[in-house]
Image: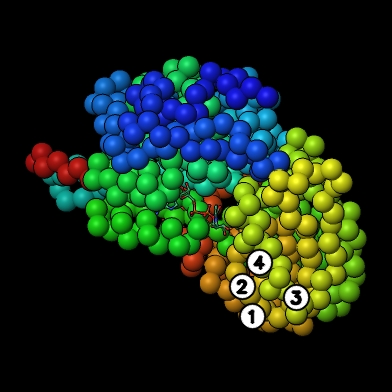
Amino acid sequence: MTLRPLNIDPSKCFIAGAWVNPIGQEVLPLLNPSDGTTLCQIARGKSEDIDAAVNAADAALAGDWGKATAAERGRVLSTIGRAVLTHVDELAKLEAVDVGKPLAQARADVLALARYLEFYGGAADKIHGETIPYLDGYTVYTLREPHGVTGHIIPWNYPMQIIGRSVGAALAMGNACVLKPAEEACLTALAFAEIAHQAGLPAGALNVVPGLGAEAGAALSAHKGVHHISFTGSVGVGKLIQATASENVVPVTLELGGKSPQVVFDDANIDAALPFLVNAGIQNAGQTCSASSRILVQRGVYDQVVAAMAARYNALRAGPALDNLDVGPLVSPRQKEIVEGFIAKGADLTCVARGQIIDGAPIGGAYVTPTLFADVPPDHTLAQDEIFGPVQVIIPFTDEAEAIAIANGTAFGLVASCWTENGARQMRMARALRAGQVFINNYGAGGGVELPFGGTGLSGHGREKGFEALYGFSTLKTVAVLHG
Ligand code: NAI
Ligand code: MG
């Protein structure tokens, strides 16, 4: 396949509206996780490239981008969204090959990116301050203003979706962005920069510097010219980023994954639940922040649910991204090693089903066999830690109180779901579950861009998506005028 369908050059950074070599002239290999070959070389951006990107963002804020009205910003975002839709096939293929994601899932991500741009394009001029009744002789009002330069450090699992929710919202509020995509998958970030530029986004409003986390990522999070950091990725790096941001006293939004449960009660509509129970665990090979990796099932339907999930697992097929099967490879041999390490730690557990890696899947691909465990003690490593692979655990429970205790019994709290036909219990569970999003009789709600999203506990803090994100990507100024 051609890697330059959109005229991108992955060995370069995109800064101030142009493709530029990293100042150190170094590159890194980008792996194709479906077969282990090198797809291309990508720029190894470092702190001097981040400096250049931050300077370009500053210049954009001082220039056309900073002067654009909210309506003009919204129009540009909407135009970019439509431009993304004219490149659906190319972007889907790039994302599939780069991430190892089955093509249909990559295509859904392109559509989600376009939808974010449509949403934030429409929202840009609909967010405003207030007037506040105050002392006699005063008029007091608030202004929503951009932070300035926003830094976006994103992972490899959903590059396009995360660009949509974070860069889309930041641009809508008038910030200028510096984006550090993951070293494992950065092609669609670069393609997006090119598309946005062609669609009329002023130079410097979005700059992309590929590179390693410890180099370009650390430089971006520590940069004194960056006024807000949004990060999606591991807990460990999230802590580092929060510590670094505290040095500069800048706000951070952290989305650090989870161990999200689905709770199935005896009275649930099991047929309706089943596809969600499995798909939420194996989508993107389980490499999803909001993956449902724990399935809690009440004892009355326990055997039935275990058997039905096992049947689905036995039918799962893993293979190359472009074969568009149920599951692709993991993003890298390193992630494969981590996930296989977890599966090995389940040697003491009951493994009730495994899918299959198809015959002919390239030997060098990072494939992991989808694996389902049952009767898992709630305090087991596999029921506590984020695995980030196609692995789910089923845990039995007796009553509502026990279900809540188990569901809330990890350090995370990103999303949770509850399956029951009992309306009062639906309401109680919605309140009791510790998570940033709770789903009743569904999981994920189709990923709606309108729905605020974020975590509690180790899952992070701050909210992305929906209008909430626009508050996060802006700061509030109170103006008090004494006029007598
Ligand atoms: P990671 O947290 O190292 O990488 C995410 C992003 O952070 C990448 O762009 C990376 O270059 C950057 N980064 C790494 N070190 C940095 C530093 N010191 N300063 C600034 N930026 C830095 O995650 P990784 O290693 O790719 O995956 C490890 C585990 O993290 C996964 O197994 C999974 O459990 C979790 N994870 C969660 C994600 C989520 O969606 N919440 C996404 C990716 C990983
Ligand atoms: Mg890759």
Q: Earlier in the sequence, mark 1 or mark 3?
A: 3
Q: Between label 4 and label 1, give the one nearer the viewer.
A: 4
Amino acid carrying label 3: it is Ala
Residue 372 horizontal/vertical position (percent): 79, 65
> Is label 2's Cβ within 8 Å of ligand 1?
no
Disc 3 secondary structure class: loop
Is 445 in front, or is 224? 224
Q: Residues within 10 Å of mark 4 (few under 14, many from 20)?
A: few
**Where residue 307 is drawn, which disc sits there?**
none
Q: Residues within 10 Å of mark 3 (few under 14, many from 20)?
A: few
Amino acid carrying label 2: it is Gln
Q: What distance separates the C-alpha of mark 1 from that of mark 2?
A: 6 Å
Q: What distance separates the C-alpha of mark 1 from that of mark 3?
A: 15 Å
Amino acid carrying label 4: it is Gly
The residue sitting at 83% across, 61% down in the picture is 354
Q: Are marks 1 and 2 in contact (CB under 8 Å)?
A: yes
Q: Earlier in the sequence, mark 1 or mark 2?
A: 1
Q: What distance separates the C-alpha of mark 4 from that of mark 1?
A: 18 Å
**Could you tell me if residue 54 is visible in this image?**
no
Residue tagged 4: 341
The residue sitting at 26% across, 26% down in the picture is 59
**Where residue 347 is drawn, which disc sits there?**
3
Q: Between label 1 and label 3, give the one nearer the viewer.
A: 3
Disc 1 secondary structure class: loop
Q: What distance separates the C-alpha of mark 2 from that of mark 3?
A: 16 Å
Asked whether, in this view, residue 141 is left or right of residue 123, the answer is: left
Q: How many marks?
A: 4
Residue tagged 2: 384
Q: Earlier in the sequence, mark 2 or mark 3?
A: 3
The residue sitting at 82% across, 51% down in the picture is 357
